[in-house]
Image (cartoon, helix red, strand yellow):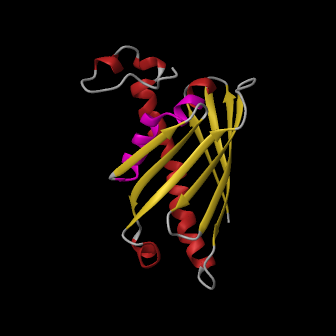
Amino acid sequence: MRLQSTLIYRADPELISRMLIDPAFQEILGQSLDAPECSTVVGPDDITTTYVIPTPASLRPVAGAQSKLIGRLGWTGPLTAGRRLGRLTLEVERFPATFEAVVRLEADGEQTQVTYEADLHVNIPFLGRKLEQQVGDLTQKILDTGQTAGEQWLERFGPQAGSAVAAEPGSQPGPARL
């Protein structure tokens, strides 16, 4: 099954490129997905995030009440002329499915478009196609949730946030690479 999602952020590509691999962004995304647990491992140009998320009722017989979702996003090259390519994989522990996406980041005036073009396959004989649609709907929701999570991140850590971020009690100053 093919999935596609295009998100548009009001910020430059360099900032959005860093946002997508920032643990604070992943934490906001996890909160948006009602994940009671979220942990990250950050590399120089990539991030691996593990979320524990509630499983939709229709998938509970196959996946259980909660699912461990592991997302890996990595940039495959440098930001050049306002463009960058990356790769996103999603894996649900103990669920036979594959999800792989090409991530395209591109400047669009004063905005940045992030497009995910993905292939999703559920590998369960006889039930795969039916489950694939349900998993596809959930995966599309996860991708689309990146819009509001990104807007929240930009409010807290973007250039307009200025020194207000550091003044928040208990907050950490934006991404380490900013």
- Residue at left 36%, top 70%? 65
Furthest residue in direction top, as rendered: 163
Q: Foreground: 40 or 15?
A: 40
* Magenta-highlighted residues: 17-35
149 sits to left or right of 114: left
* Vertical order, 38 against 44 (above or below): below
Residue at image position (53%, 45%) is 48
Q: Position of residue 88 (x, y in %)?
A: 62, 48
Q: Residue at x 68, y 28 (%)?
A: 107
* Residue 5, x across and y down, in percent: 62, 49
Give the quadrant of residue 3: bottom right
Percent position of residue 108, x then y: 67, 29
How far across and how far down the image is residue 1, in percent?
68, 66
In which quarter of the view is residue 114 placed? top right
Residue found at the very far bottom of the displayed protein:
126
Q: Is residue 155 left or right of residue 4?
A: left
* Residue 31 located within the stretch drawn in magenta: yes
Q: How many numbered discs sit on the rendered protein?
A: 0
| Residue reaching furthest to the left | 169
The secondary structure that dominates the magenta segment is helix
Left or right: 59 with respect to 133? left
Q: For this view, does 94 lie left or right of residue 162?
A: right
Residue 54 lies in the magenta-colored region: no
